[in-house]
Image (spheres, grey):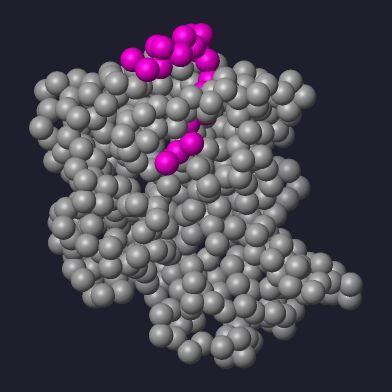
Amino acid sequence: MPSPCLAETVAVHGHHRRHQTALILNDRTVTYGELSDLTQTYRDRLLQLRLLAGSTVCVPAYKTPETIALLLAVFHEGLVALAPSPDLGAAALARLSQQARATHTLTVSASNALTADPVQGNEEEAEGFAPADPGRSSLLLTTSGSTGTPKIVPIAAAGFEAFAAWATHEFGLTPSDVALSYAPLNFDLALLDIWTFLQLGAQVVLVDQGRATDGPHVQALVATHDVTFVQGVPMVYRQLVEAGAVFTPVRHVIFTGDSLPDALLTPVSSAFPQARFHNVFGCTETNDSFIHTVDPSVPSGRMPIGRPIAGTDALVREPDGAIAQSAGSGELLVATPFQTDGYLNTALSTEAFTVIDGRTYYRTGDLVTRDEDGLYRLQGRADWQVKVRGVRTNLQEVEQVIAAHPDVAEAVVVPLPDEQAGVRLHAHVSRHPSSTLTSLRLRTHAGKHLPRHAIPTSVYITDNPLPRTSTGKPDRNLIKSNRMKETQT
C-alpha cells in the first residue's frame, strides 16, 4: 500500500489517458504518459542494480514527480520502499535504513539520473526488527517521531486497495477531480490525495514543501487549477482564508490532524461555498478510522471525530480496563480494514496491538468520550496528561484555550521539569501577521479561561510557523528541547 496493482493501473492510464494531466508542481505539468515513461526509465535502471526480489530500498520522500515515478517503479519491480522524510539527518536516515534492512538509498535528480548508494548493514541496529514482507507490503512509512524515535510502519497492499475503494465511494471521486496535496509525501495523507487520485486517473496538484507556508502561493494553486478536493491540517485553511478568496470548484474539504478551531470554521465555509465538510480522524497505523460530516451553520464546540467508517470497529477501554458497553470515556482502540500488520519492531507491536474477540485492535493512546448516540469526541492523549502542582492537567485543553485567542495562528504547550511544581507549562505560539500580541496579553487571556495551575508559566511568541516533524505535526520534542536550553544558559 501502495501496491503493484496501483503501479499497473497508473501504467494503464499512461496508455489510455496519455495526454491527461497527472501531476502539477509549481509551473510544471506532468501527463500520465510522461509519468508512465519516467516510471519505465527508472524500472530499467533498477534492473541494472540486480537487486534480489523482495529487497527493501530507501527512497527519501522528496515531493517531486521524479520521486513519485521512482516509487511506482519500485512497486512494479516487487521491491519494498522505505519512504522516510528527506529532512531527516544522515544518522537517523542510516539507522532507519538499517532497521528496515534496506540495501540501497535511491535518489533521483531533475535530469532523471538515478543514484544508488549502498546501505552499510548493521545487524545490531536491526536486531528485534522483522524483515518487511514484500508479499504483503510495498511501502514502509514512519511515524512522526514526536514522542521518540520514528517507528517503521508496513502499509498493507490489500489495505490500500480497500482504503482507495472506500475513499472513492465516500467522496464520490472521479477522474475529473483535482486534489490539492499539501502534506509531505512521507505523510499518510498522501495515501489519499496522491496515490488514490493517481489510481483513479485524476489530477494531483503538489504543494512544493519549500513554499508550503507561502499563503498566496497555496491560494493561487487552488484557484488556478480548479481544485475540487482539499485535505489538510488547520494551518492549510488559515492560509487559504487569509485573503478572503472564494474557491467555488472545491466540493470536498477534509479537516485532519489537529482539531479545527471554531473561529476558523465560519471563514472556511465562506471560502468554499459549494463544498461538503468532513472531519477525518486516524493515524499511520490504522489509516482513516472515523469521519464526521460538519455543518458549519451549527456550532458544536469542540468538533467531534465522528463515527467509525465502514468496516471499522472501535472500543473504549475505561480506566479500570473494562470495555465500555455504551457511553463511556477512556482509551480508544481501533481495528480498520486498512491497518498495518504491526511495526517492524516486534516488541513495539506487542505493546501497541491487542486481540479482542478474534480481531486485532490498535491501542491509539487517544482518550475519547463516546455518547449514547455513538458519537466520539477526542479528549486528548494519554501521554498529554501531566500533573502541575499535583493537579492533573490536559495539555491539549490548554492549547485549545490559547489557540482560541484571535491573534493566535497556532499554539503548542509542552511540559518542562520543575523542582517545586514537578512540571511547569511552556507555550510556543505563532501569531497572525501584523499582530501585536504579547505574552502578557496571552497569559491574561488564558487566566480568564483556565485554572491557575494550567496557565503556562512561560510563553514564547513568534511570527514564524511552528517547527514541525517530518510528517507535518508540531515538533513538541524540539520546542521542549529548545526551551530547556534557553533556561540553562
Q: Which quarter of the figure has residue 477?
A: bottom right
- The answer to whether one can see residue 393 in this image is no
Identified at 56% across, 88% down, the residue is 438
Identified at 79% across, 74% down, the residue is 489
Q: In x, y percent, where is residue 285?
A: 54, 36
Q: In x, y percent, where is residue 410?
A: 50, 70
Q: In x, y percent, where is residue 305?
A: 46, 54
Q: Magenta residues, as a range?
A: 44-62
Residue 98 against residue 62 in the figure, above or below: above
Identified at 70% across, 33% down, the residue is 348
Between 268 and 391, the one nearer to me in the picture: 268
Residue 131 against residue 486 in the figure, above or below: above
- In reply to whether residue 160 is colored magenta, the answer given is no
Identified at 26% across, 75% down, the residue is 243
- In reply to whether residue 55 is colored magenta, the answer given is yes
Between 63 and 187, the one nearer to me in the picture: 63
Residue 226 against residue 336 in the figure, above or below: below
Q: In the image, is 2 to the left or to the right of 437?
A: left
Q: Which quarter of the figure has residue 386?
A: bottom right
Q: In x, y percent, where is residue 315?
A: 58, 41
Number of numbered callouts drawn? 0
Between 145 and 166, the one nearer to me in the picture: 145
Q: In the image, is 408 to the left or to the right of 19?
A: right
